[in-house]
Amino acid sequence: MTAETICHTLLSQFPTVNFNQESLPFVDSLDKVEAAVGEINRAAASSGLAPLVFTTFVEEEYAVVLSRANARIFDLFDPFIGRMEESLGQKSSHQPGQAHGIANILQYNRRMSAVNYAMHCDDGLHTQEYGSADVILLGVSRSGKTPTCLYLALHFGFHVANYPLTQDDFVHGRLPESILVHRDKAFGLNIDASRLHQIRQERRPGSEYASLKQCREDVELARNLFERYRIQHCDSTSYSIEELGSTIKHQMGLHSELY
């Protein structure tokens, strides 16, 4: 979770307070820290209030410069880094970017391979390659399959394909053979019909595809297929991509080689 995300989460706890929020990403040099201090001080002067500044610096010299700003500084790492050092018996390296660098080329290559696979097998393409999948996501159009596939690929290195359930599948009342032979890898995403209607309206407003009647029918028929074939599934309506990814990973018993 980034400092920006944490900041928004914290400020959302005060709905009656009018906050002026601004993000300063990639402050990764002393010059940029000095510039940030100047911007913070200008905000303090114009508002007459000390800004609340949330930071995730690991470089101590950056934190020292930032401390000169006319603001209330909240170091989001400070509460637990010392305790972690004590518990692990090891000092922090204070080197930024370790979570994003190519520290392990094998892990990086697996991640990229998984992303390429997700794109290659997106939206029902190349079903003959489902044998290489860790998971095959099933669901009606716009139920969140593609972003979930990419999340699982990028963050965990899982090879995830997705297959859209269409009227052809519903008319025949059965899944295609390409899914059935890999049924143990299948996982279904369902969604509330009203939410699906809203999403489809943004894509194709006024179309039969986006109508509430069609959305209700598609959702019900998809659920019937999941239950008929005893395919694990979950409702994606109120889940974030991260929550969907964690749910699928847990329910399918997947273990990432990246961690």
Image (tube, rainbow, N blue to C red):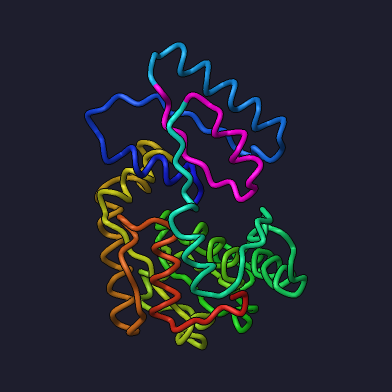
Residue placed farthest to the top in the image? 46
Above or below residue 101? Residue 170 is below
Q: Which residues are magenta?
A: 50-70
Residue placed farthest to the left in the image? 16
The residue closer to the viewer here, 96 or 103, is: 96
Above or below residue 176? Residue 139 is above
141 is within the stretch colored magenta: no
Above or below residue 97? Residue 83 is below
Residue at image location 55% in from the left, 67% down from the top? 124
Residue at image location 68% in from the left, 56% down from the top? 95
Viewed as shown, does residue 123 lie left or right of 188?
right
Residue at image location 31% in from the left, 56% down from the top? 237
Viewed as shown, does residue 60 lie left or right of 53?
right
Q: Position of residue 67 (x, y in %)?
A: 54, 34
Q: Position of residue 179 (x, y in %)?
A: 49, 80
The residue closer to the viewer here, 243 or 208, is: 243
The residue closer to the viewer here, 162 or 90, is: 90
Q: Quadrant of residue 19?
A: top left
Above or below residue 136? Residue 124 is above
Q: Position of residue 97 (x, y in %)?
A: 67, 54
Residue at image location 34% in from the left, 60% down from the top? 236
Q: Position of residue 210 (x, y in %)?
A: 35, 45
